[in-house]
Amino acid sequence: MSLLELKEYLKNRNIVSINDLCIYFRTSPETLEPMLEQWIRKGKLRKETAESCCGGKHSSCFCGGDPDIWYQWIG
C-alpha cells in the first residue's frame, strides 16, 4: 500500500473508520497511522472520534455511536 493508494481510498469513501481501513488494506492501525498523519499534516484529512463528532450524543452525526476513530477526507 502506498500513500497514493490510501489517498484514493479515502477520497472515494470520504469518511472511513480505522477498522475499515485495516480490513481493506489488511494491515494494523500501527502501520496505517503514520501514513494517515502525513495527510493530516498536509491539511487533506481530519481525524474524528465519537466525542469530537457529536459530543458523545450520537445524533445527526456519521459516527453512529461507534467509539471508533474516523477519518474524513477534506482535501
Image (tube, rainbow, N blue to C red):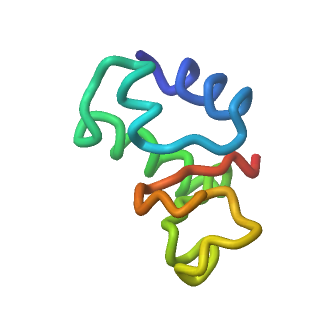
**Residue 32: which quarter of the image?**
top left
In this rendered view, identify the residue nearer to me: 51 or 41: 51
Q: Is residue 50 above or below residue 26?
A: below
Give how far across and how far down residue 12 sits, in percent: 73, 27
Q: Is residue 48 above or below residue 1?
A: below
Give the residue at x 69% y 46%: 73
Q: Is residue 25 above or below residue 51?
A: above
Give how far across and how far down residue 45 sits, in percent: 62, 51
- Tell how many labels: 0
Give how far across and how far down residue 44 sits, in percent: 67, 50
Q: Is residue 16 above or below residue 60?
A: above
Q: Quadrant of the N terminus?
A: top left
Give the residue at x 39% y 38%: 19
Give the residue at x 59% y 80%: 57
Give the residue at x 34% y 44%: 34
Left or right: 32 in relation to 7: left
**Residue 55: which quarter of the image?**
bottom right
Left or right: 48 in relation to 35: right
Give how far across and how far down residue 58 sits, in percent: 61, 71
**Residue 33: which quarter of the image?**
top left
Left or right: 64 in relation to 20: right
In this rendered view, identify the residue nearer to me: 46 or 68: 68
